[in-house]
């Protein structure tokens, strides 16, 4: 069946909205740099739950609380929620600590770390070119570690936590909005308790009405890109999504260097370059374009 061009156009629009939004997210967290990162994270969890629950009610989508009756599903969901909360917290901290470049490195690494986890935990098979892609990516990280005298902890942690989150998602297939609702519901009590003890009486430190508005809207900026992504991924090929996923870290890297003045040295260029080549090889192999190119050159 020939794909409907209107659906493809709609899918591309929603996917681009999602990835461009994620790319500009550092600007949003920078607006709240006077607020401790742990409190921003707690508010993000709380308001994400509130917004997603309201959105599900508006769309007449049943809240899937009955899924929590399964102990296995409950534990998997608790694990995935904890991982995404750790990922969010690291990201917010890194942005407001002036390390956006390192966050972009982490999200460039993420697809290849996911490939590695698929190999280790799901026994997926890799073609030689995909092994080469992994080798190049980890060479890039190794080079950066050697030159700077230490592992880029934030980048590696972001890549690993998000890859583990994706791995658990494969074991608990569920619509993204409902999934986020359950994850944030499980984390909601802990977030509220954390705020109560870290900022007693105010639930937030060092902010006024504008800061409160930004904190409340953090639920919107968290859930809407996920919703857009969920729509887009159903309407366009996964190979196209694979190309689009590099938009976010590319925008973040440009913001880091050209807007916030973070350093991007020759060491960064070589490290990122190795990872970019690895990502390019892997994406071409998955999309089938590499095979077409090799047949053309014969």
Image (cartoon, grey):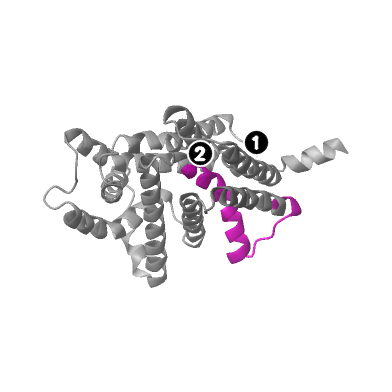
Mark 1 to mark 2 CA distance (whole Å): 33 Å
Residue 113 percent across, percent down from the top left: 57, 54
Residue found at x 50% / y 50%? 152
Residue beneath the point at 34% across and 49% down:
61
Residue 108 percent across, percent down from the top left: 55, 44
Q: Which residues are magenta?
A: 102-130
Image x and y of residue 13, in percent: 49, 31
Query: Cβ–Cβ below 8 Å for labels 1 and 2?
Result: no
Badge number at residue 2: 1
Taking the image as shown, residue 117 lies to the left or right of residue 260, namely: right
Disc count in the image?
Answer: 2
Name the N-terminal-most of marks 1 and 2: 1
Percent position of residue 169, x then y: 48, 57
Question: What residue would you read off at disc 2?
Answer: 249
Tell which of 250 and 12 is nearer to you: 250
- Could you tell whether 282 is left or right of 159 in the image? right
Determine if the magenta segment contains residue 155: no
Tell me the quarter of the picture where residue 3 sits.
Answer: top right
């Amino acid at each position: 069946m020939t794909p409907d061009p209107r659906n493809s156009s709609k899918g591309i629009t929603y996917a681009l909205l999602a990835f461009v939004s994620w790319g500009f997210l550092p600007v949003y967290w920078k607006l709240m740099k006077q607020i401790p990162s742990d409190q921003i994270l707690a508010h993000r969890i709380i308001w994400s739950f509130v917004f997603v629950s309201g959105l599900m009610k508006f769309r007449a989508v049943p809240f899937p609380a009955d899924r929590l009756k399964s102990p296995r599903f409950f534990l998997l969901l608790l694990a995935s929620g904890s991982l995404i909360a750790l990922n969010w917290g690291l990201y917010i901290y890194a942005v407001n600590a002036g390390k956006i470049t390192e966050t972009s490195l982490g999200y460039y690494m993420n697809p290849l770390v996911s490939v590695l986890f698929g190999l280790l935990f799901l026994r997926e098979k890799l073609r030689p070119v995909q092994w080469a892609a992994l080798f190049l990516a980890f060479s890039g990280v190794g080079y950066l570690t050697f030159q700077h005298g230490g592992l880029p902890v934030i980048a590696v942690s972001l890549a690993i936590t998000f890859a583990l989150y994706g791995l658990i998602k494969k074991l608990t297939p569920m619509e993204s909005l409902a999934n986020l609702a359950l994850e944030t519901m499980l984390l909601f009590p802990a977030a509220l308790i954390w705020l109560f003890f870290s900022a007693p009486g105010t639930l937030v430190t060092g902010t006024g009405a504008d800061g409160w508005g930004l904190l409340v809207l953090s639920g919107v900026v968290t859930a809407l890109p996920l919703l857009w992504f969920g729509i887009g991924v159903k309407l366009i090929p996964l190979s196209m999504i694979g190309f689009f996923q590099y938009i976010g870290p590319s925008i973040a890297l440009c913001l880091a260097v050209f807007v916030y003045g973070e350093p991007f040295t020759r060491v960064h260029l070589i490290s990122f370059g190795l990872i970019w080549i690895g990502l390019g090889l892997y994406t071409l192999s998955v999309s089938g374009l590499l095979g077409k190119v090799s047949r053309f050159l014969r």
